[in-house]
Image: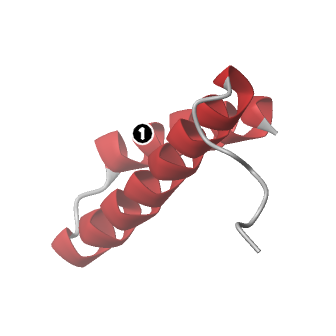
Amino acid sequence: MTHELERQIEELRAELRNAVDPCERRQIEAELDLAQAEMALAMAELDGRVDAEPPF
């Protein structure tokens, strides 16, 4: 999972470097933010800093 997220983040960064259109840049930035948040959560789960199970 994290390998796929790492690859997705790198691809989004490359797209962002090449994006000229402001609308496209905003969309890519939003996707990149989401992917980075997913990566942070995945890493926290692996480190045991957060519980992956729902509280109920």
- 40 or 45, nearer to the observer: 45
Quadrant location of residue 27? Answer: bottom left
| x and y, in percent, of residue 35 in the image | 53, 51
* Side (left or right) of 4 relative to 30: right
Count the numbered circles shown: 1
Residue at 39% over, 62% down: 28
- 14 or 54, nearer to the observer: 54
Image quadrant holding the N terminus, namely top right
| x and y, in percent, of residue 48 in the image | 68, 28
Quadrant location of residue 29? Answer: bottom left
* Side (left or right) of 2 relative to 8: right
Residue at 58% over, 40% down: 39
SS class, disc 1: helix
Residue extending farthest left: 22
Label 1, residues with CA under 10 Å away: few <14, some 14-19, many ≥20: some
| x and y, in percent, of residue 41 in the image | 57, 44
Residue extending farthest top: 47
Quadrant location of residue 9? Answer: top right
Amino acid tagged 1: Arg
Residue at 74% over, 50% down: 52
| x and y, in percent, of residue 23 in the image | 24, 77
Residue at 66% over, 22% down: 47
Colouring convention used in this rendered image of the protein: secondary structure
Q: Which residue is mark 1?
A: 13
- 5 or 15, nearer to the observer: 5
Query: Compared to 54, does 32 lie above or below?
Result: above
Image quadrant holding the C terminus, namely bottom right
* Side (left or right) of 54 relative to 13: right
